[in-house]
Amino acid sequence: MTYYLYTENQVREMWKRSYGTQIGIAQAKCFEAIVRMDGKIAVSFSGGKDSAVVLYLMAEAWSISKHKDEPLQVFFSNTTNEFTSMLPYIREYIKYIEAKFEIKIKFEIVRGEYTYFQVIDMVGLPFVSKKVARMVRDVKATLKRLNLKYADIEPLMPKAFTDKHIPERIETAEKLRALGFNNVVILYLTGVTSENKTSIRRFLPLQYRPLLDAPFELSEKCCDYLKKKPLKIENKKLGGLLPVTGEMACDSKDRMNAYRQTGCNMFDGSRPKSKPLGAATEQTVLHFIYDEKIPIAPVYGEVVFEDGIYKTTGEIRTGCKLCGFGLMFDPERFVRLQKYEPKIVQFCFTSVENGGLGYGEICSFLNEHCGMKIVIPTIEQGYYPKRIRKDDEDV
């Protein structure tokens, strides 16, 4: 049973604290991490605005700690999927922090064994959401093992998945078990557990069922290969330094649940971590950047205060530029990317037959079959012979 330090309502009450209180708590958590770990910390700096604020606060605390004459360890995890302007910005920001707080920073770039393009070739593309991609991947693997398509089993599905249709859902689950489906996949497809109880927490929405017979593969594993595994390996090499990140509970449901379990600082357990901004809000981060005139990555533009709120004039978020997660909430993402990096967008939206990534076909499929409204960039089809597979050439 999962133990929580806070309820969701308690965390939401934390968001109502004043700007000064939220920043004060973040500063206190930075000091706590430095003291409790006797300086054995490592700040993970992605170049995003949240991690820029965390590095600023941690450097400020470091500069008045007993470790001020020692270098502060800072990591950048190179996923090979950042904006091209990100690494130059990161190097400049490191110099800015060193000069402002009169400290030394030991900066290291961590990179995994594979590039983004190699990972998606191996496991599939990140589209819709991590949760949906995971379920689609698992269900498609089972269908392939059983030599079936979703269209073959769709007639077995109940008319609806409401509480009124529980008997039909259980009947469908039993039929799928007889066909050789495992309990996890049955849960995704019917919302019925191995004990024939119902749950909607792990249920593949009908909206995305067409992806089960789609001619492309989805996966949520990019982050594992490109960021999580490399950082874990690097952390072990350095003797288990406490990772310090810019994660906030307001970022997502998953991060909310994680924060409820650990709070800002967790020093024990299998995955210790410091999240000084854990209980802060997006507005607090932007307000702090605005007040302190903190330089942020070029793709953000600048932070302005308009109509009673702080906002960026450019991108709202950075991160992996080619990621397709959350496109339902940000349908113009790739059109904006085209303004910054037209060549990479041309490559991504070129067809697989021409050696591209086939983003155009995927987005068109999602729009036509899954009710999404992704704005697809207009490109001239490229040709990338080094990426054309042998079997494509032989056809």
Image (cartoon, grey):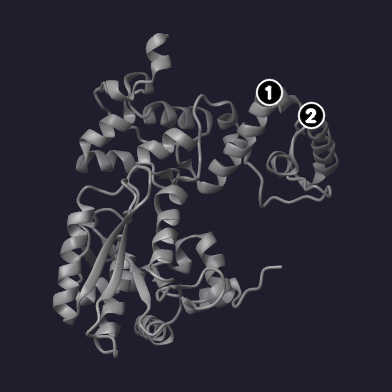
Q: Which residue is mark 1?
A: 148
Alpha carbon separation for disc pair 1 and 2: 10 Å
106 and 336: which is toward the camera: 106
Where 252 sits versus 276, above or below?
above
- Tell me where residue 30 appears, x and y as whole percent: 37, 81
Residue at the spot 41% in from the left edge and 86% down from the top edge:
32
Q: Quadrant of residue 261?
A: bottom right
The answer to whether marks 1 and 2 mark residues whose Cβ atoms lie closer than 8 Å is: yes
> Left of 220 or right of it: where is 64?
left
Residue at the spot 75% in from the left edge and 44% down from the top edge:
162
Q: Dot 2 lies on which element?
A: helix
In the rendered picture of this protein, how many numbered marks are placed on residues? 2
Residue at the spot 41% in from the left edge and 71% down from the top edge:
239
Mark 1 or mark 2, earlier in chain? 1
Q: Quadrant of residue 388?
A: top left
Judged from this view, the residue extending furthest toward the top is 395
Question: In the rendered structure, which amino acid carries the disc numbered 1?
Answer: Leu
Q: Quadrant of the C terminus?
A: top left
Question: In the rendered structure, which amino acid carries the disc numbered 2?
Answer: Leu
333 and 86: which is toward the camera: 86
- Kindly identify which numbered label has been placed on residue 179: 2
> Left of 196 or right of it: where is 95?
left
117 and 10: which is toward the camera: 117
Q: Quadrant of the N terminus?
A: bottom right
Residue at the spot 24% in from the left edge and 23% down from the top edge:
380
Q: Dot 1 lies on which element?
A: loop
Q: Would residue 377 be seen by someone viewing this image from the given angle?
A: no
- Tell me where residue 321 appears, x and y as whole percent: 32, 46
- Tell me where residue 115 appears, x and y as whole percent: 35, 42
> Left of 367 or right of it: where is 141?
right
Where 212 sits versus 272, above or below?
above
